[in-house]
Image: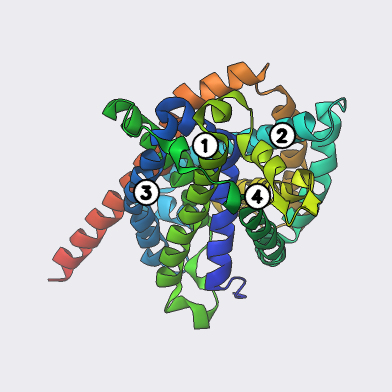
Amino acid sequence: MEKQLSKEQVSIISYFLIRSCFMGLAMEMLVQIAKQDSIFGLFLGALLGIIPFLLYQYLMNYNPNFSIIELNIHAFGKKLGKFINLLLIAFVFVLGTIVFWNLIIFIASQYLYQTPTLFIAIMFIIPIFYLLIRRLKGIARVSLILIIFSLILYFISIFGLTGQVHWYNFRPLFTTPISSILNSSFHYFAYCTLILFLITIIPKNQIAERSKKNWKTSWKIGYFLIHLFTFSALFFTIAVFGIKMTLIYQYPEFHILKRVSIIGVLERIESTLAFRWIFDFFISITFCLYFVTEGLKRTFQIQKEKVFMAIEIIVCIMITFASTMIFKNNTEGFHFLTNYFPIFLVFFFLVIPSMTYFKLLTMKKKKTFSNE
C-alpha cells in the first residue's frame, strides 16, 4: 500500500480537528461555565485527554493493516462489528454536520450577513468535495499548506495583542465552584481531546516507513503543542477583553482580533486574521467526511470506484442540507451542544473504543494461553 502520510501530517490534521471544535464550541462553554477560572478547566481537560490519546495509539498499533473499522470487525465479528461501525460512521457524520453548521453560522454572522445559509454551504461543499475525492494524500498536502498560513496569521495576532494584556482581568481566581471547573474540563475533554478518535481511520501502514518509528513521540509532542494554541486563544481573549466582555460576544475569539494593532499601521484586519478558523473548519469537515466514506468503503468492502464516488456525492449532498437544518437557531444549538452532545462524544469516542480495546486484550490473552 502506498504510504500517504508523514508523522508531521498526522499532528497537523490533529491540530485542525481540535481547533475546529474549540472555536465557537468548547471555548464558549468554558467561559460560560467557569468564567476566568476556565483556564484551569482547559488544563485539566487536556490532562484527562491523555487517557483516550494513549488508547487511540494502542488501537492504531495493534495491527498496522487495520483501521478502527477492521479492528471492530476483528474484535466483535462481522455482524456486531459492522453494526458498531455503522453507529460510529453515523455519529461522525453528525459531528461533521455540527462543525459545518458552526462554519456557516460564523461566515453568516461575521462576513456574509444577508446571504442564505444554503448558498454558503454550497460554496464550501464544492472545494470540500474536491479535496475529499483526492483522498488522504490530498487532505494531508492541503493541510500542510494551510498550517503554514494559519501559523503566520496566529503569530501576527499574538504580536498585535501582547501589549494589550491586562493581568487583572483574571482576578479574582477561584471564584467559581470546583464543580464548575470540573464541568468545564469535561466539556473541553469531550470536544478537544476525544475528537482525535477520527485519526484511527488511518491504518499505521499508511504512515511513511521513515516516520513509523517516532510517529508516537511526534504525535504526543503535537498533542501538547495543539493544546498550547487553544490555551493561548483563551488566555488572550480573557486577558484583553476581560470576562464580562468575553461572555457578551458570540465568537469572542474573532472580536478580539479587532484589537490587533501592529505599530499603529496594521489595524482592522480581523477578517483576514480569522481566515485560520475557516481553515480549521474546512479541514475538519473534510476529514469527518473522509472517515464516513472510508468507513463505509471498509465496512462493506466496496471495490468499484463508481459506487464509491456515488457514495461521496450522496454524503456531500446530505451534509450540505443537514448543516442548514440541524438547529432552528443558535440558542437551541448551543443548549444541545452544551448539555447533551458531550455525552454522545464520550460514548462513541471513548466507551466504544474502550470496548474494542478490552475485547482485543482478551483475545490476545486467550491466544497466548492457548499457545502455552
Tell me how far mark 2 sits from mark 4, CA to CA: 12 Å
Residue ID for mark 2: 106
Residue ID for mark 4: 280
First in sequence: mark 1 vs mark 3: 1
Residue ID for mark 3: 49
Dot 1 falls on a residue whose secondary structure is: helix
Q: Which mark is residue 27?
A: 1
Tell me how far mark 1 sits from mark 3, CA to CA: 16 Å
Identify the amino acid type marked 1.
Answer: Met
Indicate whether 168 appears above or below 312. Answer: above
First in sequence: mark 4 vs mark 3: 3
Give neighbour class at mark 2: few <14, some 14-19, many 20+ (Cα, 10 Å).
many
Q: Nearer the viewer, mark 3 or mark 2?
A: 2
Farthest residue toward the left?
A: 372
Q: Nearer the viewer, residue 50 or 179?
A: 179
Q: Nearer the viewer, mark 1 or mark 3?
A: 1
Q: Please provide percent x and percent y for residue 68.
A: 46, 54
Identify the amino acid type marked 2.
Answer: Phe
